[in-house]
Image (tube, rainbow, N blue to C red):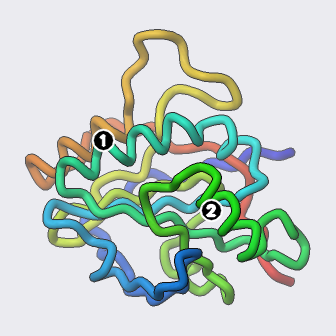
Amino acid sequence: MAALTPPICDCDWPAPEFALLATDGRTYSRGDVAGPNGMLILFICNHCPFVIAILDRLIRDVRDVQEHGIGVAAICSNDPVAYPADSFENMGKMAQERDFPFPYLHDVDQSVAHAYGAVCTPDFFGFGRDMGLQYRGRLDASKLEPPPDGQPRELYDAMVQIAKTEQGPREQTPSIGCSIKWKT
């Protein structure tokens, strides 16, 4: 498993539009996801060990940032033919089993991952209320193991800062994870 790291935040880059089917049967657009104080887009998948390792903390942090007016959606863009664990059916099972507090969207043609420049799973995009990018960092200092006690909740802290000030942190550490599984 080769780990990839996305580029650093291109602040104020505008969030691309999208319309994707979610595991709850609804189609969501950027406008449906955005909250009054911003939006957080999570590129995740079912099988990535980096995603699996952080999932409990990610769900906790999403619930907490939603209390600050941040809308959240997760997107799976992986090729489900080559990676059946990431099929729409299995996405639905994971969303239900883990009680996702956000819609889990299926990027069938991978156009949204391309539009966002997503590189890996997990890959986080935090936008302010004006839909300008303010955070492209990691969840926390973990990789495949939980972070040491007392480490900051980097994604949560960044999104609260964005909700309050419209500005992300100046110092951001990129996420790390498995590559998006592109179709051939």
Q: Quadrant of residue 38?
A: bottom left
Residue at image x 18%, y 49%?
68
Describe residue 168's horizontal placement relative to residue 175 as left or right.
left
Q: How much space separates mark 1 and mark 2, taking CA atoms? A: 25 Å
Residue 58 visible in the current orientation: yes
Q: Position of residue 107 (x, y in %)?
A: 61, 81
At label 2, counting other C-alpha atoms closer than 10 Å, the crowd grade (few under 14, some 14-19, many 20 or more) is many
Q: Which mark is residue 23?
A: none
Q: Which mark is residue 64?
A: 1
Q: Earlier in the sequence, mark 1 or mark 2?
A: 1
Which tag is nearer the camera, tag 1 or tag 2? 1
Up/down of 178 relative to 142, above or below:
below
Residue at image x 50%, y 43%?
174
Q: Amino acid at mark 2?
A: Val
Residue at image x 38%, y 29%?
153
Q: Which mark is residue 119?
A: 2
Q: Amino acid at mark 1?
A: Asp
Q: Are marks 1 and 2 in contact (CB under 8 Å)?
A: no
Helix, strand or loop at label 2? It is loop
Q: Position of residue 112 (x, y in %)?
A: 54, 81
